[in-house]
Image (spheres, rainbow, N blue to C red):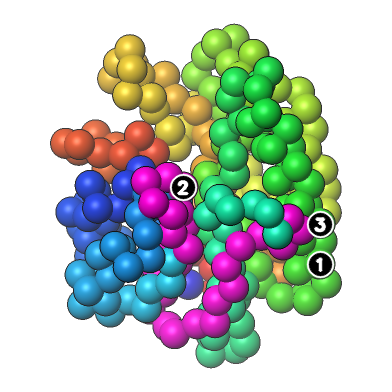
């Protein structure tokens, strides 16, 4: 089973890239973040014509997450724990397989910048909610993938120039501590299960020639339950799509699971 995640940075602006990716890579399931549209504005017809079932949790102009799957699936929208949170940042699916199910979530964690604003406490509170929810999901003891843009640089080797990020909400010690707390529940970082190499990035800013200089960071992650980690076959960052015309500043990353 091929599962990919991609912060598409406006699905309507990148619809050509999205359709190309679905045709070229043909993931069994794809998690999208920052679709930046309401549910009824998602280009559903074009995606469905390629054989995908589509579920969205949209928001006008900001945020928004979606899951596309070749198989029909059940879905739940929103991260539990705060009924006052109106930001569309989490959608969860249960996808049937020949031998059971795979639970898959598309996560768009808050950026949190500037750290001295109320955006950073919101980021940390969201991470606390995600930790609590992930703890409950792990009790199901099923293959589970938390996939998405976590807006967390886990380690210095996950940035080309980590010194530029020391004051950023993505790399602050408290952010990384929360991420480690999430991982300590028993989750596996899919990429780090296959390599310890540096220089592997999923995001390159539009500014200052970051793409051309490979001045990137790794903030898009696929986190696996023990049952999913046991089935992990490979991990691939689909870097080339970042170099296309009018590309998202993120690039897809995908895994292969035996299910």
Give the quarter of the image for residue 104: bottom right
- Left or right? Give the position of 191 relative to 4: right
Relative to residue 65, is residue 242 depicted above or below?
above
Quarter of the image with the C terminus in it: bottom right
Q: Which residues are magenta?
A: 57-82
- Asked if labels 3 and 1 touch by Cβ distance under 8 angstroms, the answer is yes
Give the quarter of the image for residue 192: top right
- 168 vs 79, nearest the viewer: 79
Give the residue at mark 3. Answer: 132
Specify the farthest residue to the bottom.
98
Give the residue at mark 2. Answer: 63
Give the residue at mark 1. Answer: 136
Residue 83 rendering spot, x and y as whole percentages: 70, 59
Q: Residue at x 78, y 38 (%)?
A: 178
Residue 72 located within the stretch drawn in magenta: yes
Distance from Cα at disc 2 to Cα at disc 3: 22 Å
| Element on which disc 3 rests | helix
Give the quarter of the image for residue 229: bottom right
Q: Residues within 10 Å of mark 3 (few under 14, many from 20)?
A: some
Residue 170 located within the stretch drawn in magenta: no
- Left or right? Give the position of 198 relative to 187: left
- Asked if labels 3 and 2 touch by Cβ distance under 8 angstroms, the answer is no
- 37 vs 76, nearest the viewer: 37
| Element on which disc 2 rests | loop
| Element on which disc 1 rests | helix
- Would you say residue 210 is visible in this rendering? yes
- 116 vs 147, nearest the viewer: 116
């Amino acid at each position: 089973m091929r599962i990919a995640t991609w912060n598409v940075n406006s699905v309507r602006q990148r619809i050509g890239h999205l359709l190309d990716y679905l045709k070229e890579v043909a993931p069994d399931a794809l998690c999208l973040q920052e679709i930046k549209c309401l549910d009824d504005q998602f280009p559903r017809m074009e995606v469905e014509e390629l054989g995908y079932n589509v579920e969205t949790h949209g928001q006008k102009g900001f945020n928004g997450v979606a899951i596309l799957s070749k198989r029909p699936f059940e879905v739940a929208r929103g991260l539990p724990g705060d009924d006052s949170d109106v930001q569309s940042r989490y959608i969860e699916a249960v996808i049937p397989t020949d031998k059971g199910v795979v639970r898959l979530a598309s996560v768009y964690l808050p950026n949190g910048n500037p750290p001295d604003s109320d955006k950073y406490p919101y980021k940390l509170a969201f991470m606390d909610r995600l930790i609590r929810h992930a703890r409950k999901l792990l009790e199901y003891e099923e293959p589970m993938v938390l996939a998405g843009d976590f807006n967390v640089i886990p380690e210095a080797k996950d940035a080309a120039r980590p010194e530029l990020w020391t004051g950023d909400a993505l790399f602050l010690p408290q952010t990384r501590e929360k991420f480690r707390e999430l991982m300590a529940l028993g989750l596996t970082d899919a990429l780090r299960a296959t390599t310890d190499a540096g220089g592997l990035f999923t995001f390159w800013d539009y500014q200052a020639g970051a793409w051309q200089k490979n001045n990137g960071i790794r903030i898009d992650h696929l986190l696996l339950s023990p049952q999913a980690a046991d089935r992990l076959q490979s991990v691939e960052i689909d870097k080339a799509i970042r170099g296309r015309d009018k590309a998202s500043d993120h690039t897809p990353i995908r895994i292969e699971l035996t299910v």
